[in-house]
Image (cartoon, rainbow, N blue to C red):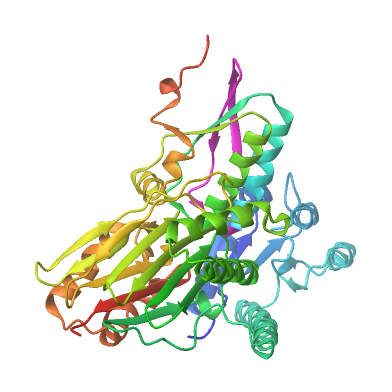
């Protein structure tokens, strides 16, 4: 579900292979995200461009992943949110909780 | 509303010709079919779509039906999907092995297609009956415990009319909760929350959150504290400390109606912005709060907004189910679309929420994809 693209100087670039992010895949997503955070010492960057709908179960899983990252002194960053998803994040103030970028290139990765 | 009937079938077979025949017949009987020509393709489909039943061939190259079934059993979210093997009579050993893997039945491929279709419909009907029975049992248990996440009475508040509309998704209680708490003749609190999750799991946690909201309101007001921000702050701190609620998040809109000053104060936690309808100007204002979801960070700050309603002005407080809908391109969330729909209704109609429930809110429940809750506060002449 979370496909790894590459690892680069402390960041693990990934993409989420899901169109409808909902109750049916939220538990699996959370387990994979926590697994990635535990298994790597990297900040996880997730490309979300495929996601056209996200329900509250999935938002909950995403936030649970972020809380886990913070407890490990790591982070979860999001890129390429579609407009509907980006609007939803600002409506419920999750844009203040996650670092959100237009694409991978906007993240200043130490090179 | 009755629970939606299960009718989504995932058909897995490397014989595309046979798949097409099945789809043609099944679609005729009202089943919604998805085809996969291999177990691997089926696994890909299952990442985004959960069917009500899987019909899989036994003999397939790469991953056969038995291996596919074993894969499903290993995955918690897939293991309980009813599974039926399609096979030839010659596969007796495989049939026994398959039934050992909790497949609920097998269908012999040589059977006339109409009989296969009828058998599948019977299995789905049994699955539906079982689901309804389980759901009814939990609902009855909840009823006998007399626990409710939605109020049964609406308190009288001088100068205001309060009403709400709540529609659980597929008639199964979910994570939305509403509370109306009259403190005395002057003050009434209105709370709307949405636990992030769905169905019974979310519903179970609504009582924990409701209890904290009620307790925080009672403790605060006993101490003369009528600040919604301070109450939401307290609720959040307690929730962050509660190990049982770890990883359970909820939105909350908390409003305090002061019938003496005829004003409303509001604090929000990760909730959708409220909509304030100005009757004079016939326009909707968005009222935003800054607060983050309950349970996110113990040290989060919450702000407080003061809202003044003029006579006939209305305030709408709602959960995300109101802005989610099933469109042509799948499920979508669109706050502005909901606001536009609401505004055009308000402009053309009498400001009666009872009629709005009937004429606007209950109309598109077939497009509903989540619990829907909306509270209406209407300012009346005194």
Identified at 73% across, 66% down, the residue is B80
Magenta stretch, overall SS: strand
On the rendered structure, is B338 left or right of A48? left
Residue B242, horizontal then vertical, whole percent: 69, 56
Q: Give A58 or B161, whichever is nearer the viewer.
A: B161
Between B141 and B188, which is closer to the camera in this rendering?
B188
Q: Which residues are magenta?
A: A1-23
Q: Please, which residue is most extreme toward the top here?
A: A111
Residue A94, how many percent across, how many down? 45, 45
- Residue A23 lies, with reference to residue B25, above or below; the image says above
Magenta residue check for A5: yes
Can residue A55 be seen at all in this image of the molecule? no
Q: Residue furthest front?
A: B224
Q: Is residue B313 left or right of residue B196?
A: left
B248 displayed left or right of B85: left
Q: In the image as oriented, which residue stretches furthest toward the left? A: B281
Which of the 4 image quadrants contains residue B118? bottom right
Q: Is residue B353 above or below residue B57?
A: below
| Rendered residue at 52%/54% (across/down) | B233
Q: Nearer the viewer, residue A98 or B276?
A: B276
B9 up-or-down from B376: above or below: above
Q: Position of residue B152 (x, y in %)?
A: 49, 88
């Amino acid at each position: 579900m979370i496909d790894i693209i590459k690892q680069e100087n402390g960041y693990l670039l990934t993409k989420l292979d899901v169109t409808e992010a909902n109750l049916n895949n939220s538990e699996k997503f959370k387990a994979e995200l926590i697994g990635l955070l535990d298994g790597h010492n990297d900040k996880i960057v997730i490309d979300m461009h495929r996601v056209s709908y996200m329900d509250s179960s999935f938002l909950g899983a995403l936030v649970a992943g972020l809380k886990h990252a913070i407890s490990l002194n790591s982070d979860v960053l999001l890129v390429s949110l579609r407009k509907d998803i980006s609007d939803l994040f600002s409506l419920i103030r999750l844009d203040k909780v996650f670092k959100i970028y237009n694409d991978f290139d906007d993240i200043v990765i130490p090179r | 509303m009755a629970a939606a009937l299960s009718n989504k079938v995932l058909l897995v077979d490397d014989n595309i010709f046979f798949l097409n025949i099945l789809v043609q017949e099944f679609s005729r009987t009202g089943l919604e079919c998805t085809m996969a020509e291999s177990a691997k393709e089926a696994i890909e489909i299952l990442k985004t779509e959960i069917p009500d039943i899987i019909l899989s061939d036994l003999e397939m190259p790469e991953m056969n039906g038995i291996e596919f079934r074993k894969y499903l059993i290993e995955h918690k979210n897939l293991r309980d999907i009813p599974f039926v093997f399609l096979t030839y009579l010659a596969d007796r050993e495989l049939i026994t092995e398959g039934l050992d893997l909790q497949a609920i039945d097998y269908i012999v491929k040589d059977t006339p297609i109409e009989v296969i279709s009828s058998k599948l419909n019977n299995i789905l009907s049994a699955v539906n009956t079982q689901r309804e029975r389980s759901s009814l049992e939990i609902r009855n248990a909840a009823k006998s415990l007399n626990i409710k996440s939605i109020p049964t009475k609406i308190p009288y508040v001088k100068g205001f009319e309060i009403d709400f509309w709540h529609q659980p998704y597929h008639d199964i209680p979910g994570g939305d909760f509403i509370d109306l708490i009259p403190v005395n003749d002057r003050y009434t609190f209105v709370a709307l929350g949405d636990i992030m999750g769905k169905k019974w799991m979310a519903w179970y946690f609504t009582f924990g959150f409701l209890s904290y909201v009620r307790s925080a309101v009672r403790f605060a007001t006993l101490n003369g504290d009528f600040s919604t921000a301070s109450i939401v702050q307290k609720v959040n701190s307690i929730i962050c400390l509660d190990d049982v609620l770890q990883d359970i998040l909820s939105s909350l809109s908390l409003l305090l109606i002061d019938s003496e000053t005829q004003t409303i104060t509001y604090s929000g936690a990760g909730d959708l912005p409220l909509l304030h309808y100005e009757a004079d100007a016939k326009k909707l204002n968005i009222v935003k709060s800054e607060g983050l979801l309950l349970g996110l960070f113990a040290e989060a700050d919450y702000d407080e907004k003061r809202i003044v309603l003029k006579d006939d002005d209305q305030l709408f407080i709602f959960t995300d189910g109101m802005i989610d809908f099933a469109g042509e391109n799948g499920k979508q969330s669109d706050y502005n679309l909901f606001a536009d729909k609401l505004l055009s209704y308000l402009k053309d109609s009498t400001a009666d929420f009872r009629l709005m429930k009937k004429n606007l809110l209950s109309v598109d429940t077939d497009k509903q994809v989540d619990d829907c809750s909306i509270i209406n506060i209407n300012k009346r002449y005194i």
